[in-house]
Amino acid sequence: MSNYPKPVSFSALDTCHQQMLEQLKALSALATRIEAEGIDAEAQQQADQIETFFSGTSRAHHAQEEKMVFPPILAGDNDELKATVTTLQQDHGWIEENWIELSPKLRAVASGNSWFEPAELVSQVAIFVALVQNHIALEESTVYPAAKSLGITKNDK
């Protein structure tokens, strides 16, 4: 029996990862479009949706991982997995730091403002996208399977 009373739904975590990947794709396309064409009503709506997702759903997802997925691994004796979790925790910090710089630009787009340099937006988006994609790949290939093997998952049927 697990020492962690609240089991994690990896199905929900996986679904959130898929949503993140879709939002990242939309974010990349939006930044490229803004650079080429400027801001229009559709760009405003997309920016609002993307900003809301990463400021809300994505942050909550990371908080759940920090609270429910990472602790059992850190409490274990597998040093390689513990190092991977430490890397993922650092990633969460980098993702948050990048988001803090990027989100005001998306809020500006959502409001129809263009006080930023579009080329800088494209560059910042590329960095953010790569960081989140690599982070998700590491979680799904290493940490999620390890956490599942520790029995912290609930029935996802």
Image: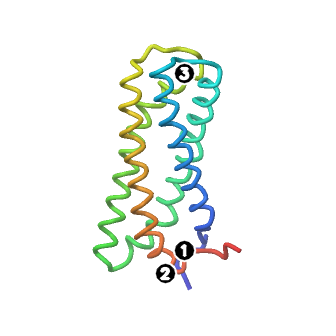
Per the image, label 1 sits on a secondary structure element best described as loop
Per the image, label 2 sits on a secondary structure element best described as helix
Give the CA distance from mark 1 to mark 3: 42 Å
Q: Position of residue 3 (x, y in %)?
A: 52, 78
Image height check: is 107 above or below 66? above
Relative depth, front residue between 126 and 88: 126
Q: Nearer the viewer, mark 1 or mark 2?
A: 2
Q: Position of residue 156 (x, y in %)?
A: 67, 72
Q: Residue furthest front?
A: 36
Q: Which part of the image, by quadrant, shows the C terminus? A: bottom right
| Residue wearing tag 3 | 109
* Mark closest to the chain's N terminus, 1 or 3: 1
Amino acid type, callout 3: Val
| Residue wearing tag 2 | 149
Give the CA distance from mark 1 to mark 2: 13 Å
Q: Position of residue 26 (x, y in %)?
A: 55, 39
* Mark closest to the chain's N terminus, 1 or 2: 1
Q: Residue furthest bottom?
A: 1
Rendered image: mark on residue 150: none
Please rate how many residues cluster around mark 1, counting C-alpha atoms within 10 Å: few if below 14, some from 14 to 19, many from 20: some
Q: Is residue 127 left or right of residue 38?
A: left
Q: Which part of the image, by quadrant, shows the N terminus? A: bottom right
Please rate how many residues cluster around mark 2, counting C-alpha atoms within 10 Å: few if below 14, some from 14 to 19, many from 20: few
Image height check: is 143 above or below 48? below
Image height check: is 26 above or below 118? below
Q: Position of residue 94 (x, y in %)?
A: 35, 45
Relative depth, front residue between 12 and 129: 129
Q: Is residue 48 left or right of residue 79?
A: right
Residue at x-position 35% and y-position 31%: 123
Residue at x-position 48% and y-position 25%: 104
